[in-house]
Image (cartoon, grey):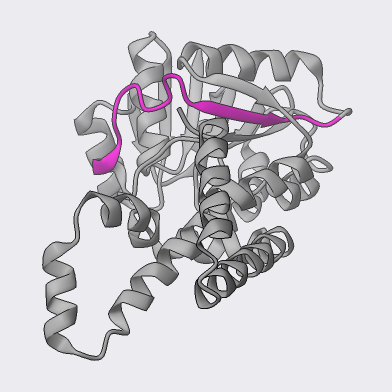
Amino acid sequence: MKIGILGLGLIGGSLGYDLRSQGHHVLGVSRKESTCQTAVALGSVDVASVNMNLLATAEVIFVCTPIGLIVPQVEHLIKHLKSSTVITDVGSVKAPIVTAISPIWANFIGGHPMAGTTDSGIEAAQKKLFVNRPYVLTPTSQTPPDAVAQVEEIVRSLGANIYHCQPEQHDRAVSWISHLPVMISSSLIASCMSETDPEVLQLAQNLASSGFRDTSRVGGGNPELGVMMAQYNRQALLISLQKYRQNLDELINLIEQENWTALTTRLESTSQARPNFVD
């Protein structure tokens, strides 16, 4: 199968590796010629170009650009395609993308692989990135079943675990477990940097170990992605942040009141709940 990838960064490059390993002919498009050359040299794609017309013969196209570019890029892309071409995207926000693209391209299926790292760019791409990771698909009631099945088959071949939901449900869910943690993690780093004693700050930096590394990781990621999460999933993220602030205020009150019994109950509850989210 000829599969196109528009956007050759971490996700697009990683998709290319896995799809080529299965014998698909992978066509890549990037805004930069240097990225195209690197993608071919690394073996992520068979051929690459800065021109979208390269994707005219693709049967399925994955749009792997930053969130804010997905809709305008698709609007430009479809001028080069035959109507049977299936398009899917990998954006971490779904409702505004599905709402904008579905009316202009019948064979569009919103998608979001829950995989990645804090690194970006084609050099960060890696093989088997999607194995055993959730991959959300958000077809609408008007999406042709054949198009959905085609994307499902490809996603399943990546070793990913497929989930179906409505775009709005997806955005509410990821606001809790993906977008909120980015903002919390960023706030953690900013709070630590507010230490006014330079010796204490330096000591904290020297002592930071696995606990800080785990809780600060996503806050040290791509700033552009964090801004787009907030911009395109604004309402759901605000609800999550407000609920988090409420919980934080409750913890402050318990500590101010030295209510260690209630604090113990609270921490026991969260300790028991965590396995529901992660292994």
The kind of secondary structure the magenta stretch mainly shows is loop
Residue at screen point 34% across, 21% down: 128
Q: Quadrant of residue 81?
A: top right
Q: Quadrant of residue 146?
A: top right
Read off the magenta span.
Answer: 123-140
Instruction: Return the x and y of residue 193 as percentages of the image width and height.
Output: 29, 79
Nearer to me, 135 or 148 = 135
Residue furthest to the top in view is: 23
Image height of 33 relative to 87, above or below: below
Q: Is residue 139 magenta?
A: yes
Tell me if I can see residue 5 in this picture: yes
Nearer to me, 133 or 195 = 195
Instruction: Return the x and y of residue 59 as percentages of the image width and height.
Output: 59, 20
Residue at screen point 19% across, 32% down: 41
Residue at screen point 48% across, 63% down: 184
- Give the position of the C terminus as an image quadrant: top left
Image height of 226 relative to 115, above or below: below
Image height of 223 relative to 136, above or below: below
Image height of 115 relative to 217, above or below: above
Q: Is residue 267 magenta?
A: no
Instruction: Return the x and y of residue 143 as percentages of the image width and height.
Output: 82, 26
Residue 213 relative to residue 253: left or right: left
Q: Quadrant of residue 111?
A: top right
